[in-house]
Image (cartoon, rainbow, N blue to C red):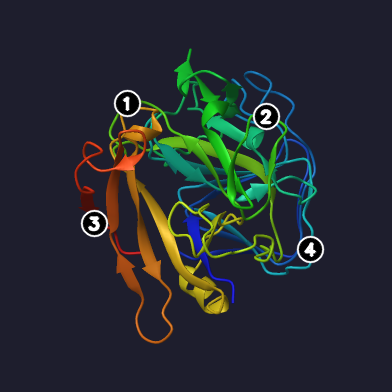
Amino acid sequence: MNRIIICLVFFTSIIKIQAQDLIIKGDNFIYVDNTVLYVNKGIDLQDKQTNSLDGSMGDDGGTTNGSNIYLRSGAQLIQGDNNYTNRGEGNVSILVGGTANKWSYNFFSSPVGLSDGSGYKLNQLDQPLKKNGDALTNGISSKSINSRDVVFSTSHNNILNNDKLQISSRWLFKKENENWVMINNPEGSKVNNGFGYMSKGLGEKDNDRSFHPYEFRGLQNNGDIEIPLDFIPIEDGDSYSELDDDYLYLLLGNPYPSILDLRKFIADNKNIIESFHFWQAGDDRSHSFGESEGGYATLTVPVDGAYEAEAATFKILKGGGVFGNDGNNDEEKFPKKIQDL
């Protein structure tokens, strides 16, 4: 039996606003604040954005053009019928938060995709703006619906350049087969629905002490999204895994703009999933792999009995990638408390 360990990226009052088919036309939108928009059947966001600050999404009048749905303050979008394919040139907009500084990685997965359902591209990532057009730089509780395109570069760090978010493709990676693959063409490269990617953060604060906002815009995914598990051969002695040689590791994330019930997900897949790992970054102060710090907190899937959660064990890589405080002494470990999952 193939065994996999899944690194998950996750994105609550349940008040249903019910509709059969939801159709939005022209310069109209639905704004959902801290509740659930429930659509029984299909969603058609017919018209695309045409007027904005810089040719992307938000305009200087504080309004938007296009047929869009804005999910704010923990709002969710749920569809009742899996058989409907959503369509249109409008967008569902969701704010997500990154907690990593410029030396550490955020793990992201898009809750929306391309209109053809084939995945998502990183150029669907936007920079949220305040109502006055300034960059939103802290938290994801903003009510604003303005945003603009992220600028991709090959610079050494992610930066705010004249208030515009600039992300370096040096630090963009996705998992393909057993390998981490650099996403060196963010505008053209595609990530399959349900899979995640890594991107370094912003600023110089300690990790988990800031919450920088990002915005995903795209079409709502619907229906079953299947992740094949038999495309990677698992052989004794393989050393491709960063955690353990005997397991298959995938970086997956929630592909829907609604909360994923992890325990239900486990129950539906308990014969093939053994545990979940949640990355916790340390206090990185360098891009050098030999100075990286971090660890995985673990949630073990129960066969019988209760779930078992294990705190992250922090390891510092020193001396060219050797675990230890100076490359010569025993491995140094720093336990860190894991919050309830």
> Of discs 4 and 3, which sits in the foreground?
3
Q: Name the N-terminal-most of marks 2 and 3.
A: 2
- Badge 2: few (under 14), some or many (20 or more) residues near its Cα, within 10 Å? some
Q: Name the N-terminal-most of marks 4 and 2.
A: 4
> Of discs 2 and 1, which sits in the foreground?
2
Q: Which residue is under mark 4?
A: 84
Q: Name the N-terminal-most of marks 4 and 3.
A: 4
Residue 233's place in the image compared with 199, above or below, is below
Identify which residue is drawn at 70% across, 60% down. 222
Q: Where, by quadrant of the figure, is residue 114 drawn?
A: top right
Three-letter amino acid code at disc 4?
A: Tyr
Q: Name the N-terminal-most of marks 2 and 1.
A: 2
Give percent across and percent down for residue 324: 25, 43
Whether residue 78 appears in this view of the structure is yes
Q: Which residue is under mark 2?
A: 185
Q: Which residue is under mark 1?
A: 204
Three-letter amino acid code at disc 1?
A: Glu
Residues at circles 2 and 1 in contact by the CB criterion of under 8 Å? no
Q: Which residue is under mark 3?
A: 337
Give percent across and percent down for residue 139: 39, 38
